[in-house]
Every structure is written in C-alpha cells, then in structure tokens.
C-alpha cells in the first residue's frame, strides 16, 4: 500500500520518497532546467559526478578543480569544504600507492594557482603547499621512473614559470620540493641555476616595489644543493658570506664542532649580534661543554635550557648528574626558588617547581608550595601526591581553594566542579566532617545562587 505524504513529514523524507518514485528522464529534465539558473547546483553536480564520465583522468581532475574554484566568489563554505576534500584525496591516493592519481591531483593545483582574493587566500595557499608535499613524497617513493620524470618536469615548470604568481609561503614549498626532488648532478645544477635566477628576480622586484623578498630562504636551499653535490668548499663559502644570519652561523658552528674546533665554534657564537642567545645556540654550547667535560659550563647551560625550554626535565636530569649527592639537596632548593621567580611564565614555573619536588620526594616542601598557591587547579593537580601523608593539611588546602574558586567564578560548570571536588574530599580520611561543614557554609553564603544550592544538595552527606 502506497504511503501518503503529509505536510508533517520532514523535507528530507519527502525528497527521499519522491526520488524513489521519479523516472530517470524526469530527473534529467528537471536538472537541465534548474542548472540554467542555479549555477551552484551546476558546479556541485560536476564535482560529485565527474568521475563517472568518459573524460581522461587528467581531464577529470582539471574539471573538478575548476568547478571548486568557481565557488570561491559566492559560496565560501562549499569552496573551502570541497577544496579540503580534493587535497585530502590527493594524499589518500598517495597512501594507497596510486601515484598517478596523486600526481594528477597535485598537478592541477600547482599549475592552476591563481592570485587569490583576500577571503580565499589561506585555503588556496594551504592547498598548494599540500600539493607540493605530495610531489615531494612521489619523488621519494617507488613510483615508476617515467612518472617520477613527469614529477620532476612539473616541479621545474612550477619553479621557473608558475612561481611568478605564488605568494611567499607557496614559493618556499615549491623550491623546497624542487631541491628534494633533484637527485642527479644535471638536476642539481639546473636547480642551482634556477635558485640564482629567482634570487636576482626577487632583488629586482624588491628594488621596484619595495616588497620584501625571501633571499635568505633561497640561500638556505642553495646551501642544501651544494651539500648534496658534495661541493664543500662552495658550501662553506656561502655560510661565511651570510653568517650574519642565525641559520648560516649555526651551520658554521656545527661544522667547527664536527672538526673538534671548539674554540672557533664558541667564538662564532660569542660574535653573534643580539642580547639573548636563541635556544639553538645554547644547545650547541652545551654540546661543546659536554665534549670538553666542562662541568661548570654544563651546569650553567643545563639550568638555562631547563628554563628556556619551558622546563624540559631532560636538562634537569643532566644538571643533577653534575653534582654529588651531598651537594645536590642544596641545589634543589636553589633551582626551585629560581623557577618560582620566573614571572614570564608563572604558572609553568610553579608546575615545574612542584614536579622537581615530586622527583626529589620532598613532600614537606611540596605541601608548603601547594599551601602558598591554593588555587583550585593547582591543588587538584598535586593533592594526590600528598593526601595520604598529610590528609588534614590537604583537606584544609582544598577548603581554602574551594572558597576562593566559588567567590571568583559562577555558572553551571563551576558549580559542578565544586561538587566534584567536595566528593573527592569526602574520600580523604577526616573529609566527611569538613565537607559537611563546607557545604553548609557555601549554601548559606551563596543562597541567592539557586543553581549552586541545587548542585550542593546533590552531594550526599553522611
């Protein structure tokens, strides 16, 4: 028996019923009439059904991509969603070792890049960068040699011709992919020449428009190519000519370290302009200090890196190894005090101090730290280490933290957080009595907050 369609049905359900009842010619006529005025439907139809056509695989990718681009001007969400799907399929083809379709998808993106409007710039740049990543992986894969050669020719064309319209980030992805794919002397020589041409072109454009150009990035790639060609003398000269830049100075330092020229390496670091040394140079100094077995320098650098690395405990453990047990306890107190004074990252400093005290099993000091910093989040993080050793003290810290938290915050999630903490407190020896008193206190103090009182009533007091 045929089901009647009523106005109470959802549009989606009505559509499903009608679709099953309609013939193919009727659907075709409807679509042909509709797409004359509905361009959005036209392009969505093409995108989702082009794979079923008789076009070549290359043509299919081209048509689908052009249809996606058509949405950029009048439906940003569809444009973004479809572009993401297109780039994801390219990566998926690669993972499935379908190198041809992966290449064709990436080829369409890099060869059809158009200077985007401001609203769609980020999406197009991300798609182009992802496409070059796919081309890099194809060059490293076990794809057929003829496809790898096509891959190389595409990268050459992109670097030589298409890159004129690329923004900075995409230019970097393009030339980095070119360098990765260059695996023979002839290709490496061509890449060197192309990079040199790009540098000169960028300089000329800079002089005309005063727009910033990324010469340093191109010089870094040039250095990589020289290294791949084993032209060590030319590579070293390039580093020396550009050592004002941290990348090149760091590579020079690494070169001196490899040759055990530690004095020269330290001198290069000392000559660097600037107030503070970047973490990378501190790590190189630490490497030198370890090779020279300079305990004093290791101690100083490990402590600096412990702080500048946002408390990577690899450096803390290295620092500990530099002291006898008899002297280490005193150093722990000093380090904890230094960390706590770090006002640039106060919360992280407190967490680091707590973790140091846990590692050293300094439970009394950890308790005092928690007592002095009785905010609820901090207490929650470290109460578990203390509740068995100091149950009454922990309950008192909890009580202080809950009071402060309830005073400063409002809202359903806040109230649920408080009741959750009260239940935890009940599980600590002596907690039931304190929770009972605290719950009554909160109900009286915040009796105007009905939602809070209702949540507090859910705490079973026994």
Image (cartoon, helix red, strand yellow):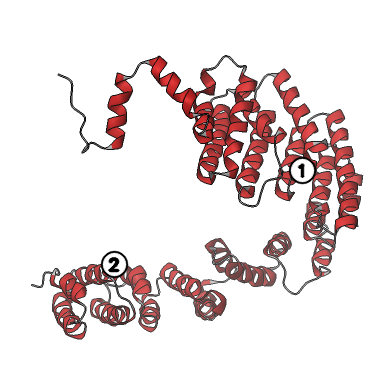
Label 1, on which residue?
A: 165
Where's the C terminus, which quadrant? bottom left
Q: Going 34% across and 75% down the picture, which residue do you hit?
A: 376
Give residue 386's position: percent from left, percent from top. Answer: 31, 72
Give residue 64's position: percent from left, percent from top. Answer: 58, 29
Is residue 162 in view? yes
What numbered label is drawn on residue 413? 2
Mark 1 and mark 2 in contact? Answer it, CB < 8 Å: no
Q: Is residue 200 above or below residue 332?
A: above
* Circle 1 crowding by C-alpha within 10 Å: few under 14, some 14–19, many from 20: some
Give residue 270's position: percent from left, percent from top. Answer: 81, 69
CA–CA distance in space, label 1 to label 2: 50 Å
Is residue 230 in view? no
* Circle 2 crowding by C-alpha within 10 Å: few under 14, some 14–19, many from 20: few
Of mark 1 and mark 2, the one earlier in the sequence is: 1
Locate residue 344: give its quadrant.
bottom right
Which of 123/440 is in front? 123
Q: Going 70% across and 66% down the picture, which residue do you hit?
A: 278
Tell whether 332 sits left or right of 121. left
Locate residue 19: give its quadrant.
top left
């Amino acid at each position: 028996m045929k089901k009647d369609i009523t106005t109470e049905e959802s549009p989606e359900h009505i559509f499903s019923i009608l679709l099953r009842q309609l013939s193919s010619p009727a659907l075709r006529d409807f679509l042909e009439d509709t797409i004359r005025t509905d361009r959005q439907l036209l392009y969505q139809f093409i995108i989702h059904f082009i794979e079923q056509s008789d076009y070549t695989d290359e043509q299919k990718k081209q048509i689908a991509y052009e249809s996606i681009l058509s949405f950029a001007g009048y439906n940003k969400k569809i444009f973004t969603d479809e572009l993401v799907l297109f780039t994801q399929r390219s990566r998926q083809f690669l993972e499935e070792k379908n190198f041809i379709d992966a290449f064709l998808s990436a080829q369409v993106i890099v060869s059809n890049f158009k200077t985007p409007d401001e609203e769609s710039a980020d999406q197009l740049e991300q798609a182009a960068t992802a496409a070059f990543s796919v081309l890099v992986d194809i060059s490293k894969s076990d794809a057929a040699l003829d496809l790898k050669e096509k891959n190389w020719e595409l990268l050459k064309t992109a670097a030589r011709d298409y890159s004129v319209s690329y923004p900075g980030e995409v230019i970097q992805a393009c030339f980095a992919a070119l360098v990765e794919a260059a695996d023979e002397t002839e290709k490496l020589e061509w890449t060197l020449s192309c990079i040199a041409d790009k540098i000169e072109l960028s300089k000329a454009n800079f002089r005309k428009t005063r727009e910033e150009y990324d010469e340093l990035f191109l010089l870094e790639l040039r250095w990589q190519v020289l290294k791949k060609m084993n032209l060590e003398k030319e590579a070293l000269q390039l580093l020396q000519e550009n050592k004002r830049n941290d990348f090149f100075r760091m590579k020079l330092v690494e070169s001196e370290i490899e040759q055990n020229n530690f004095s020269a390496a330290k001198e290069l670091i000392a000559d660097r302009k600037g107030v503070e040394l970047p973490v990378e140079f501190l790590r190189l100094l630490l490497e030198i200090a370890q090779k020279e077995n300079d305990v004093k320098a290791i101690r100083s650098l490990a402590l600096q890196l412990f702080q500048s690395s946002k408390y990577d405990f690899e450096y803390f453990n290295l620092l500990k190894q530099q002291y006898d047990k008899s002297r280490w306890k005193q150093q722990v107190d000093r380090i904890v005090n230094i960390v706590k004074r770090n006002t640039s990252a106060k919360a992280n400093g407190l967490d680091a101090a707590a973790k140091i005290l846990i590692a050293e099993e300094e439970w009394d000091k950890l308790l005092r730290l928690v007592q002095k910093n009785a905010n609820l989040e901090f207490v929650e993080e470290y109460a578990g280490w203390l509740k068995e050793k100091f149950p009454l003290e922990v309950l008192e810290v909890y009580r202080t933290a809950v009071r402060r938290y309830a005073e400063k915050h409002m809202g359903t999630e806040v109230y649920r957080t408080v009741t959750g903490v009260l239940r935890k407190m009940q599980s600590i020896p002596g907690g039931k009595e304190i929770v009972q008193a605290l719950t009554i206190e909160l109900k009286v103090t915040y009796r105007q907050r009905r939602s809070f009182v209702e949540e507090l009533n859910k705490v079973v007091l026994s």
